[in-house]
Image: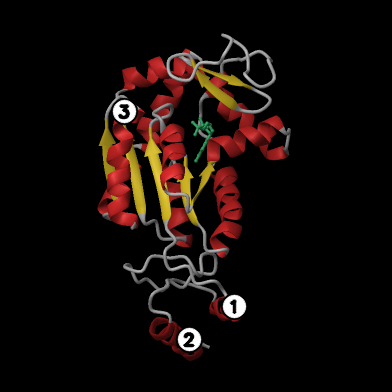
Amino acid sequence: MFFLAFKVHKLAENSFARFVVNPMMMYCLPRTRMAVRNATYRTYFSTLQQSAPQHDECRFLLILGKPGGGKGTISKKMLVDFPQLHHMSTGDILRANVRNGTALGREAKFYMDEGKLVPDRLIIDLVLSDSTPMLKEGKSLLLDGFPRTITQAMALEKEVNVDLVVNLDIPTETIVERIADRWIHPASGRVYSYSYRPPKVKGFDDITGEKLVQREDDKPEKVRTRLAAYDEATAPLVNFYDERGVLETFQGTKSDVIYPEVKNWLKLKIL
Ligand code: AMP
């Protein structure tokens, strides 16, 4: 058994040297860091036999930063300039689950409303199961809001190789001002900012005319809890990815100023 596994390992190394063998992300892994992992080789070969699309150019990107630090805004800009990326925001997915009253949403809501992180056991499975279909199709993915703890980062690392990490370093006082300015349309999740993306009529959604509200976790005391959770649980990820040589930090207070730098860096790395 061991001998057979060894032979398969070697065959995989030789024949498919540009792919990292991984049952979940078979066709879409970095070319540079060769790492044949503890893959299910049977799955590997049977999946290859199903004429897998070999997307050599696909990438796995993360965007890190404090809550309210503009990850969503920068991600949207990235999607325009790099349309090959598919955006996945754990905050958006969780809010959609809350809106739809799913079991996950009901459990997550308690933590989210308190400004706390949703437990790893809930979020890790969610992210890995949602990203699998996209990765299997060979799509490039931009993950926003995950990982947020070292446990999540390690779970992710078991499944995929992260290519690039955009780390947004925004001053806390800018974030507090920004969050106070953010109002949403709860039914759709549409987000407005009174400073830079105001609704046509103050306090009301542009499309439905319904009332805008402040997110429960955007209220000042909850914002403090979220920032503390970031410092304690998420900030260590900056070193984690820096040590792996995939992270670049962008500092500033305005997304319009920061983004061109992000774009230039990504162009160098992606094209
Ligand atoms: P966000 O919109 O990304 O700020 O996320 C809103 C809330 O969703 C967070 O304050 C957490 O309660 C929860 N959340 C989102 N992503 C994660 C994650 N990776 N781990 C734990 N909780 C998360």
The location of residue 44, given as percent across then percent down, is 55, 76
Residue 250 makes an appearance in the image: yes
Secondary structure state at the residue bearing disc 2: helix
Q: Nearer the viewer, residue 216 or 138?
A: 138
In the rendered structure, are the residues bearing label 2 and label 1 in contact, judged by CB atoms less than 8 Å apart?
Answer: no
CA–CA distance between discs 3 and 2? Answer: 47 Å
- Name the residue: 47% across, 72% down: 38
CA–CA distance between discs 2 and 1? Answer: 19 Å
Q: Which residue is mark 1?
A: 51
Quadrant of res 58: bottom left
Residue 241 makes an appearance in the image: no
Q: Nearer the viewer, residue 181 or 41?
A: 181
62 vs 189: above or below: below
In the rendered structure, are the residues bearing label 3 and label 2 in contact, judged by CB atoms less than 8 Å apart?
Answer: no
Quadrant of res 184: top right
269 vs 136: above or below: above
Which numbered mark, 2 or 1, is in the foreground of this view?
Answer: 1
The location of residue 62, given as percent across then percent down, is 41, 47
Q: Nearer the viewer, residue 205 or 234?
A: 205
The local crowd at label 3, few if under 14, some if 14 to 19, many if 20 or more residues have their Cα within 10 Å, is many
Q: Which residue is mark 2?
A: 8
Q: Which residue is mark 3?
A: 170
Q: Three-letter amino acid code at disc 2?
A: Val
The local crowd at label 1, few if under 14, some if 14 to 19, many if 20 or more residues have their Cα within 10 Å, is few
The location of residue 65, given as percent across then percent down, is 37, 35
